[in-house]
Image (cartoon, helix red, strand yellow):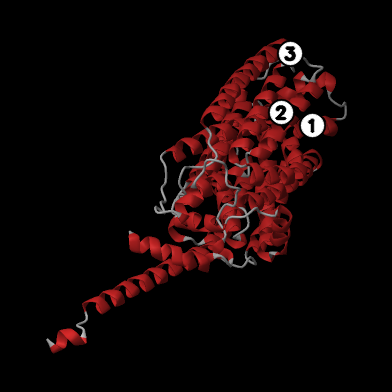
Amino acid sequence: MAIFRSALSRSLPELDNGPQGQPILVQKKEPGENWTNNVAGSSPTTKVHKRRWIIVMLFCLYSMSNAYQWIHLNIIANIITKYYNASLPEDRFQRETTVDWLSMIYMLAYIPLIFPSTFLLNKKGLRVCAIAGAFLNALGAWLKVACISPDRFPVLMFAQTVCAIAQIFILGLPAKIAAVWFGPNEVSTATSLGVFGNQVGVAIGFLVPPILVPNSDSLGEIGDDLSIMFYGGAGYMTLLLILVIIIFKERPPHPPSKAQMLALQNVHEEHYGKSLVNLFKNVGFDILTITYGVNTGCYYAISTLLNPIILDYFPGHEESAGQIGLTIVIAGVGGSILAGIWLDKTRTYKATTFGIYFLSMAGLVAFTFTLDVGHLWVVFVCAGALGFFMTGYLPVGFEFAAEITYPESEGTSSGLLNASAQFFGIILTIGCRAMINRVGTFGSNLLISGVLLLGTICTGFIAADYKRQEAGKEILEQMDNALEIEISEKDSEKSRMTKPTSHDIQI
């Protein structure tokens, strides 16, 4: 151990320059935290703590609740339109688009707020952002309780806007939590688990509302059912806020990997503006930002408009629409987890990204051409295949971005990816709504399929520049070289001490 400590101290100056000298996650040292002391002191300890699973599971629950609030109104869009008709525009397209904005407000709020929120994440850390998001999430849920009246759609939209602001403290956190709390062979899996919580929330948002709020000719009954749904959500999200305040910690007592431990010896404050410039200068990341936005934007559009898409072919099947949405998400959860495990094992980021992108397009084409078959089970099967690949793409995109943009912050890169997704989500949702009203659902689905084809082609032009992997290899090589030098010095010293002197030879 003494030899290793000496070798480590020799290797640190060599790590001061270049990408390998930067931490996977750069943050200011908090009072009372001793990661740097552990590096410079006598016990350079790395350790993965069991608490990391509690942190990531709590984040999953927190993310789940916000994702639920994103889609739980649009999956019963026809019922929401009926109940709040008195406070909606008279024109059909405007009325339906206004209800669509209950989903799209999430996308719109994210785009301008991602930059200050990412700055806050980099400067104040995980705990501050987690508490802020949980508070806004609970506040929005309680505001919805005050919306139970047909003339209060503007209040409902305001409440949904508060929830939308909360999501900016959520979507960029999975990669950050994984980097701070998990070892190098768990990073992709942990990121996938972070995305997993969001997807489960969407699944519940698809499944539960059609059950709690069935279609009815009585506005009073619909109002009572909405009240039950809103009160239940508010209570649950208040509990989560309390748990986040009590349990969620900024970082573990020890760094989870040698790369983090060595890099913190050279820790410095990150210049957020410079980081943004570096990301925009990275051509591969620029292309990935567009293609990720297209793929995820298509997913947002399908999720927002799933109610009218299914009811167009299967009138009166509101619950089936929710169950099809559930199928898309549950299959996607499996895809996300398997994609994360696959990346941890193979590290083939570009090939995996391209393959999943192509299969997402194929799944949507199959979904499009089987809707009019007339058999719901066929639609369920195709929807599951679509969800497996389209949702499975989410963590892959995050990790691919982290690889090609290292040493820039994962929070910054993932924030830009999500901003692109929101932008394309708004455009595609509005475009598909117009196509549904003027051309039909089939034309709308063909539009999304064509967009995914273009995204697949563009993905092929992204260079497989795995900077994070190379940095990790360089760090380990430097440590090995330093250790070999130290061992060699010890052997030379031992040899000199045991070599007979001229006096010994004379005797």
Left or right placement of residue 403 versus residue 259 in this view: right
Q: CA distance from mark 1 to mark 2?
A: 8 Å
Numbered-mark total = 3
Q: Residue at x 61, y 57 (%)?
A: 401
Q: Mark 3 or mark 1: name the one nearer the start of the chain.
A: 1
Local secondary structure at mark 2: helix
Q: Mark 1 or mark 2: name the one nearer the start of the chain.
A: 2
Q: Residue at x 56, y 53 (%)?
A: 396
- The residue under label 2 is 77
Q: In the displayed structure, would residue 92 be above or below residue 433?
A: above
Local secondary structure at mark 3: helix
Whole-percent x, y for residue 116 in the image:
74, 44
Q: Image quarter for residue 276?
A: bottom right
Residue 400's disc number = none
Please, what is the three-letter code of the amino acid marked with disc 3? Leu
Local secondary structure at mark 1: helix
> Is residue 443 in view from this perspective?
no
Q: In the displayed structure, would residue 466 be above or below residue 503?
A: above
Please state which of residues 247 and 351 is positioned toward the viewer in this rendering: 247
Whole-percent x, y for residue 255 in the image:
47, 49
Whole-percent x, y for residue 171 in the image:
63, 42
> Is residue 412 in view from this perspective?
yes
